[in-house]
Amino acid sequence: MTNPVPPAVPKPGPPPNRPVQPHTTGDVVEGNGSEQVVHGSPRVVLVGPPGAGKSTIGRRLARALNLPLVDSDDLIAKGEGKPTGEVYSELGEERFREVEAEYVARSLASGGVVSLGGGAVVTESTRTLLQAHTVVWIDVSVEEGVRRTSGNNSRPVLNAEDPVEHYRALLETREPLYREVAMHRVRTDSRPPQRLVAEILNLIESR
C-alpha cells in the first residue's frame, strides 16, 4: 500500500501593491485634499519678513515632501472669519500678537511644512517653541521686499509714508530674532524658487 501524495502547496503570490506614504515622522494624518491635517512635528518651519517668499517656497516644499502646507496667517483668517490684515487692524499689534501666538502654537503641533507670519517671532513664547524645530529663515533685501509688498493692502503693518525706511526699520528689529530661532538662512532676491527648495531639502535630509 502506497502512501497518499500530499496536496501541492500553492506558491505565495506577489505582495499587494502598497501606496507610497508621505514623508513624515510618524505623524497621524486626518482629512483629505486641501483640508488634510497632519498631527505631529513639522518637517520644517519657515520664518522671515513679509514679501520674502515664504508662501511660494512653502508650497513647493510641501509638494516635494508630499505633505500639507500649514500657514499660520491662513489659520488666523479661517479661525477669526476675516483676513489676517483686518484682524490686525481691529485688534492692534499687541493684542494681535497674543492671538497670533495661539494659532502659531497650534500650527507647530501639526506636521507638514509650516510657514509663520513675518512678525510671529517677536513673541517670546513663539521663539521658545521654535527651539524644538528645524527653522529656516527666508530672507530678502529691503529693496526687493518693498517692491514685492508695495500696494498690498492686506499687510497693514507695512503701511507707512516712507515704505523703504519703514521696511528697513522692520528688518533691523526682527533680524536678531530670525537669527535667534533659525539654523539656516536663504536669500530669495535673485535665485529661482526651485534652487532654494533644493537647498532646503538638502538641509532637511541631512539632519
Image (cartoon, grey):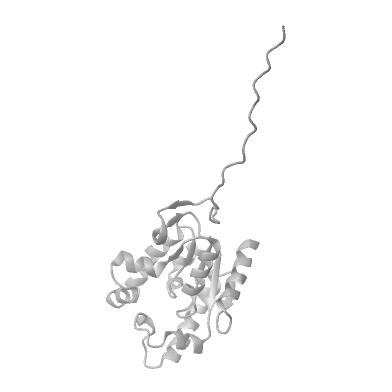
Looking at the image, the residue that sits furthest to the bottom is 162
Left or right of 103: which side holds 14?
right
- Image quadrant of residue 185? bottom right
Q: Is residue 181 above or below residue 89?
A: above
In this rendered view, identify the residue nearer to me: 109 or 193: 193
Q: Residue at x 32, y 66 (%)?
A: 78
Looking at the image, the residue that sits furthest to the right is 2
**x and y, in percent, of residue 121 in the image:** 46, 71
In this rendered view, identify the residue nearer to me: 128 or 139: 139
* Total tally of numbered discs in the picture: 0
- Image quadrant of residue 82? bottom left
Q: Residue at x 28, y 67 (%)?
A: 81
Q: Is residue 182 above or below residue 105?
A: below
Quadrant of the image for the N terminus?
top right
**x and y, in percent, of residue 29 in the image:** 45, 52
Left or right of 52: which side holds 15?
right
Q: Is residue 39 above or below residue 61?
A: above
Quadrant of the image for the C terminus?
bottom right
**x and y, in percent, of residue 109 in the image:** 45, 57
Q: Is residue 1 above or below residue 117?
A: above
Left or right of 17: which side holds 158?
left
In this rendered view, identify the residue nearer to me: 53 or 49: 53
**x and y, in percent, of residue 108 in the image:** 46, 61
Looking at the image, the residue that sits furthest to the front is 1
Q: Residue at x 37, y 87 (%)?
A: 151
